[in-house]
Amino acid sequence: MEPLSGELTTLREFRTTDLEDYLAIAGDDRVTTWMAFDSYDRAKAEQNLAGIVQRSAQADRPDYMLAVTRPDDDHVIGFARIAPSGAWGAKLGYAIGADHWGHGYATDASRVLLRFAFSTLGRHRVTAAIGPENEASIKVVKRLGFTYEGHLRDHVFTNGDWRDSLLYSLLADEYSPRP
């Protein structure tokens, strides 16, 4: 798959050589406190990255887990995922390294993935499930036009406890490539 470009980010396939950058994000408690998984150690990050690379090579890939980089720098600063769900839906997820928070990278990368989901993949509906305390991520989806749908109780088990999620969605006819 060719890289996808936004204004602030480029989304490309992960490579096994991205391990250090990937571990710096997936192994950082500041980031994973908001994720549906606990922080990875090196072995877990290496195993997970190998799986991402393997899935991306499949003809009928189950998801698009992409490395987020800046257009002028190929180092991975985050990851973004769009996972087709059912005949017409998809699930959106993203994480930006804590040292890169507050620059609009999550919004830009999500905008790029939404364009891909609604055009290339022909999806009708994209959802995002976000922890209620993750105010920054809630602002991202609201900025992109998502609508709040409801509260999912004990939705994910992470960091030793059950966590609720707030469900947001965006429909194809509500989608606008620009804010």
Image (cartoon, grey):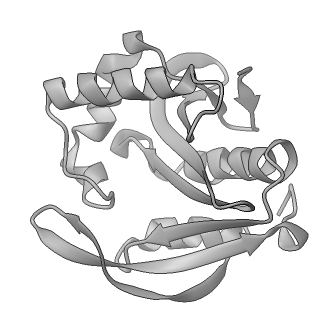
Left or right placement of residue 167 versus residue 170 in this view: left
* Residue 140 coordinates in the image, percent (x, y): 59, 65
Image location (x, y in percent) of residue 74: 55, 16
The quadrant of the image that shows the C terminus is bottom right
The quarter of the picture where the N terminus appears is top right
Q: Judge from the rendering whether residue 105 lies leftward or rightward of residue 171; answer left or right.
A: left
- Residue placed farthest to the left in the image? 160
Q: x, y percentage for residue 143? A: 68, 69
Q: Identify the residue at image location x=26%, y=76%.
A: 163
Residue 160: x and y, percent?
Answer: 9, 65
Residue at point 75% right, 37% down?
6
Number of marks in picture: 0
85 relative to 133 in the view: left or right: right
The residue located at (73%, 53%) in the rendering is 114
Give the residue at x 44% y 48%. 95
Q: Is residue 142 visible?
A: yes
Looking at the picture, does residue 116 appear above or below residue 142? above
Q: In the image shown, does 31 or 123 lie closer to the viewer?
A: 123
As drawn, 118 above or below 176? above
Location of residue 98 with respect to 157 vertically, above or below: above
Rendered image quadrant of residue 70: top right
Does residue 145 appear in the picture of this structure?
no
